[in-house]
Amino acid sequence: MITEAGSDSRAGTATGNLPLMSPHVAIVTDSTAYLPPRAIERHGITAVPLTVVLGDRALEEGTEISARSLAQALQKRHSVTTSRPSPDMFAAAYRAAAGAGATGIVSLHLSAEISGTYDAAVLAAKDAPVPVRVVDTGTVAMALGFCALAAAGVAEGGGTLDEAVAAAEKRSAGTSAYFYVDTLDYLRRGGRIGATQALLGSALAVKPLLTLSDGRIDLLEKVRTASKAIARLEEIVVERAGSGAVDVAVHHLAAQERAATLAERLRERVPGLVELHVSEVGAVIGAHTGPGLLGAVISPR
């Protein structure tokens, strides 16, 4: 889903860097892309933060609440919810990009099926001072991050707005994401389990493997033990990666040892591996998956 608009802007706030990759096309995403800080800086990508509401406190992801603090709050069963950025935050990001010389902006966001972030960006784009192409990537985490990097690569090479959008869409179409959670309870609480709702009664008693399908979180397989589920996740990644050039990201929440072990196994078993990113997810995704999350993103080049 893509929306394009442009004209004037209103006040707002946003976080991230001014676009450095090109005087013509700027790249904006949101904090759920979980891009490595060095990549954000190197490519001049702006990441607009989502918000985590912990009790009565609204905290910006990435700057005001850490993954560790979020995991501790979840383990204590504190009330945790999330919310999209305001349109004003996107308006500020678009205004800053235009002020830095951009004549067009590609704004790439997590699936509209699981967040209202895309809608907020569309509203802001209507009054932007330059054309903005808002793209629902249908993804999240580094599946979204790889789309932003693909668009940035085209922009750095002097590509047009349409070419940068096409590169992001192509990357999105070929990228897949799979993840293991210790329990579906957090996804159930947040209403993010889609087609798996009917399976809750039995699935909560097993170890689920999930995937992103058409922008929604769907149950892929039910496995009896955590060790078998993680071994199956590894096999899925190796099968999906194949032998061609591919980038892989391993994500976790409060499961660093699991992530390190999976990453090492994938280094050994994926012959066409180009880049391997290992990172803890931020508070927004963590709020819906809970501690123990282990995920993998496979993105062919």
Image (tube, rainbow, N blue to C red):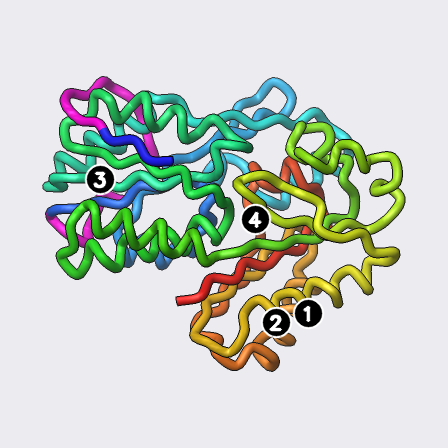
Q: Between disc 3 and disc 4, whose residue precedes?
A: 3
Q: Position of residue 259 (x, y in %)?
A: 65, 63
* Placement of the C terminus among the 4 image quadrants: bottom left
Front of the two marks 2 and 4: 2
Residue at position x 57%, y 22% from top? 57
Q: Between disc 1 and disc 4, whose residue precedes?
A: 1
Of the pair 132 and 46, the residue shown nearer to us: 132
Label 1, secondary structure: give it.
helix
Residue at which label 4 appears: 281
- In magenta stretch: residue 257: no
Label 4, secondary structure: give it.
loop
Q: Position of residue 298 (x, y in %)?
A: 52, 62
- CA separation, marks 2 and 4? 22 Å
Q: Amino acid at mark 3?
A: Ile
Q: Is residue 106 above or below residue 149?
A: above
Q: Amino acid at mark 2?
A: Val
- CB of mark 2 within 8 Å of CB of mark 1? yes
Q: Amino acid at mark 4?
A: Val
Q: Between disc 2 and disc 4, whose residue precedes?
A: 2
Q: Amino acid at mark 1?
A: Glu
- CA separation, marks 3 and 4? 26 Å
Of the pair 234 and 286, the residue shown nearer to us: 234
- CA separation, marks 1 and 4? 22 Å
Residue at position x 38%, y 52% from top? 147
Residue at which label 3 appears: 105
Q: Which residues are magenta?
A: 5-23
Of the pair 180 and 264, the residue shown nearer to us: 180
